Amino acid sequence: MKRPYVYLVGAGPGDEDLITVKGLACIKKADVILYDRLANPNLLRHKKDEAICINVGKSPHHHQYTQEEINALLVEKASAGNIVTRLKGGDPYVFGRGGEEALALLEKGIAFEVVPGITSAIGASNYGGIPVTHRNVSTSFHVITGHEDPTKGKSTVNYEALAKLEGTLVFLMGVGNLKEITEELIKHGKALETPVALVHRGTTGRQKTVTGTLANIKEVVEKNQIESPSIIIIGEVVNLRDGLNWVEGLPLHGKRVLVTRTRQQASQLTTKIKALGGEVVEFPTIEIKPSENLAEIDKKMKAIDVADYIIFTSVNGVDSFFKRLRTLKKDIRDIGKGKVVAIGTATAEALEERGLVVELIPEVFTAEGILESLKGVIKKGDTVFLPRAEIARKNLVTGLMEMGAIVEEIPIYQTVIPTHRKEELLEILQEGVDIITFTSSSTANHFMEILGKENAELLSNSKIAVIGPITGKTVVELGLSVDCQGREYTIDGLINGIVEGL
Ligand code: SAH
């Protein structure tokens, strides 16, 4: 049995990349992860396959845990011999009740570590274009709970003292009490024209910032419907935002993008969306599995050295092909002298990484494009091998046969629907998704199968972006419409299509 251990980890303010290296390591080694509403759920992608995740934050779909229950759960899971990681939004000790959890563990003699995180007080300010201190403008900053209504009973927040401070005031949990907070500060002498900003869901794809003064911010917030979670920043530093607002000018800022590719393939798309300021929600609707018909596959794999051409139509095809080749104790020396064709640049890269020279990439990255570029190249009687998905369109085979080729299909992999909770998808869509991306017909078909036609109205506020015309056709057949499509059928093309189509 492992030694019971609990890591109380700050997940950062929202942008998943703002977790610390140490925090990420704690996710990777955990047997059980307890996470919050404010911790980015994308971080759970890094967990061990068998690790159990428990959402202890507020959500309409499950039991809401009290702090006492969370404390008890930490003790229970750790006592059972698990490494437990408790992921909390921002920093665990900044209004995060991390101290209470640590004390509960201490009381039971359970070893723990606390990993700091970037608090929203600093992270959301930064992404809102506001430095919390600035030379000659603000020499201190003060983080205050806005949770307590200062006008009711005895507030532990000393507004008289706060109003006298020259430094920046950052209120957390204060949206509901904004009126009282501003009134108390004004009452105690803070100037009416003091600049104020609210940053809603800072560092996430749905970040929204509004500014005003102590006198009018209440109306600004109401007009723009700014709700929790938001931070309130009060002080002259707010004026620096005009020049320092590097985030909100990014082309995908404020956009939440759903990525439906496989976990393994998502990263390239995810990284690019994030670099353009978008927030990514990964929800894979396909999973790649080796085909079951191994006898047929192996027979063809062993005969591949007779090929005149080998055509790869996806990265998955390349991966699965080489995996099987290895299992058969073969390598690139055994595949003969057949010329290698790749449907597009990503597939070509995957082949080149394995030491193969790609002879041909069509101008248009589709099966039709391949046929077009092989016209007059393929000779009658040439043998063409096609390692690809079990379900694949037949037109490539038909077209090649019309050119007189002998075609050997190798149905090397299958795409299956991952075991998903439909509720998870519904929750993601209810929270709001601006763009849904489909990089293949399978991702689109599976997406609708998981969602169910009866829930299609949940897509009414989302735009749909597809990698190319074939996927686009599938989307239309599913009763949806295509809003963005790139000119080049690659991930970069898709991204450009999204930016242009918005
Ligand atoms: N431990 C957290 C704070 C938890 S209290 C931290 O260090 O950030 C919850 C409050 O934090 C919210 O009411 C809101 O005021 C603030 N908050 C958390 N994440 C936020 C975000 N991404 N953007 C704006 N405010 C946020």
Image (spheres, rainbow, N blue to C red):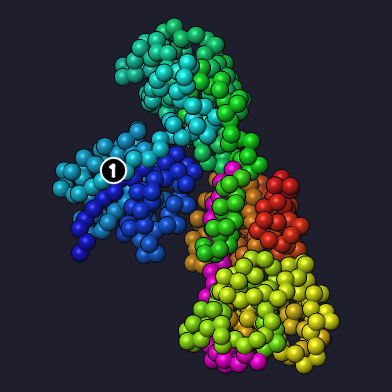
Residue 476: percent from left, percent from top: 74, 61
**Corner quadrant of residue 385:** bottom right
Residue 44 vs residue 290: left or right? left
Query: 157 above or below 445?
Result: above
Which quadrant is home to the N terminus? bottom left
Residue at position x 47%, y 15% in the image: 136
The image quadrant that residue 466 belongs to is bottom right
Residue drawn at x 34%, y 45% as measured from the top left: 9
Q: How far from the left and from the top, in percent, is residue 247?
A: 58, 36
Residue 310, position as x, y percentages in the image:
67, 82
Up-down: is 375 above or below 449? below
Front-most of residues 384 and 66? 384
- Amino acid at the residue labelled 1: Val
Residue situated in front as seen by the camera: 448 or 344: 344
- Say which quarter of the image contains residue 46: bottom left
**Numbered marks: total:** 1
Label 1 SS: strand
**Residue beneath the point at 56% across and 22% down:** 240
Q: Does the magenta stretch include residue 132?
A: no
Relative vertical location of residue 440 with respect to residue 67 in this rendering, above or below: below
Between residues 340 and 217, which one lies in front from this camera angle?
340
Residue 387 visible in the shown view: yes
* Residue at left offset 40%, top offset 38%: 118
Q: Give the range drawn in magenta.
A: 277-306
Q: Quadrant of ligand 1?
A: top left
Q: Name the residue under label 1.
A: 114
